[in-house]
Image (cartoon, rainbow, N blue to C red):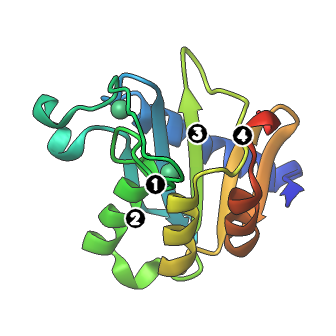
């Protein structure tokens, strides 16, 4: 990982702002997230988090689960912004995914400057479809991860690291 600087940072800020704009459409009751995927300056996919089909009927945001012991599978509520962005790219510009970069952000009133790699569902899909890099917003600035590193760090993430 590294923090972006100078011109690279300036360009990335614009794309994180775009991701934040997309996040405003989020329909999740827990958080609003946005993702854009970019290849050579072109946005090839975007997504926000929401119930499947954007439908109330499929909303599970506020469910509490009694999970079986040692149950390790993901039951978080909505379609993740990253999945939506990847599906969008696969539908419209699939040939451009390889070597692309994903920008992710979460917003409240404004961009949330938190963001450690932790979602192993996303990190595996990102790696698997050939996205090369991920940008997150953090306290110290915009942080760039290779997809491989992002996946490894997500698997290492522990709750207390928040
Ligand atoms: Zn939700
Ligand atoms: Zn995720």
- Element class at badge 2: helix
- Is 114 placed left or right of 75 in the picture? right
Q: Check contact, mark 4 vs mark 2: CB within 8 A.
A: no
Looking at the image, which is closer to me, 7 or 24?
Answer: 24
Quadrant assignment, res 91: bottom left
Mark pair 3, 1: CA separation: 10 Å
Q: Residue 150 in the image: x percent, y percent?
A: 71, 63
Q: Residue at x 73, y 45 (%)?
A: 116
Q: Earlier in the sequence, mark 3 or mark 1?
A: 1
Which x, y percent locates residue 111? 62, 27
Tell which tag, 1 or 4, sits nearer the viewer: 1
Q: How far apart are marks 3 and 2 (CA)?
A: 15 Å
80 lies above or below 153 = above
Residue under circle 2? 86
- The residue pinned by badge 4 equals 137
The image quadrant where one finds the C terminus is top right
């Amino acid at each position: 990982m590294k923090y972006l600087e100078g011109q690279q940072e300036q360009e990335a800020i614009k794309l994180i702002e775009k991701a934040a704009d997309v996040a405003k459409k989020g329909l999740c009751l827990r958080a609003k997230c946005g993702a854009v995927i970019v290849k050579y300056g072109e946005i090839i996919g975007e997504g926000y988090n929401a119930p499947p089909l954007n439908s109330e009927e499929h909303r599970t945001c506020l469910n509490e689960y009694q999970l079986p012991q040692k149950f390790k599978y993901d039951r978080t509520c909505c379609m993740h912004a990253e999945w939506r962005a990847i599906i969008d790219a696969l539908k419209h510009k699939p040939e451009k995914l390889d070597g692309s970069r994903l920008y992710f952000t979460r917003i409240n009133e404004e961009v949330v400057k938190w963001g450690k790699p932790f979602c192993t569902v996303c990190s595996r899909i990102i790696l698997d479809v050939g996205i090369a890099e991920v940008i997150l917003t953090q306290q110290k600035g915009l942080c760039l991860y290779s997809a491989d590193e992002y996946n490894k760090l997500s698997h290492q993430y522990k709750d207390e690291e928040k």
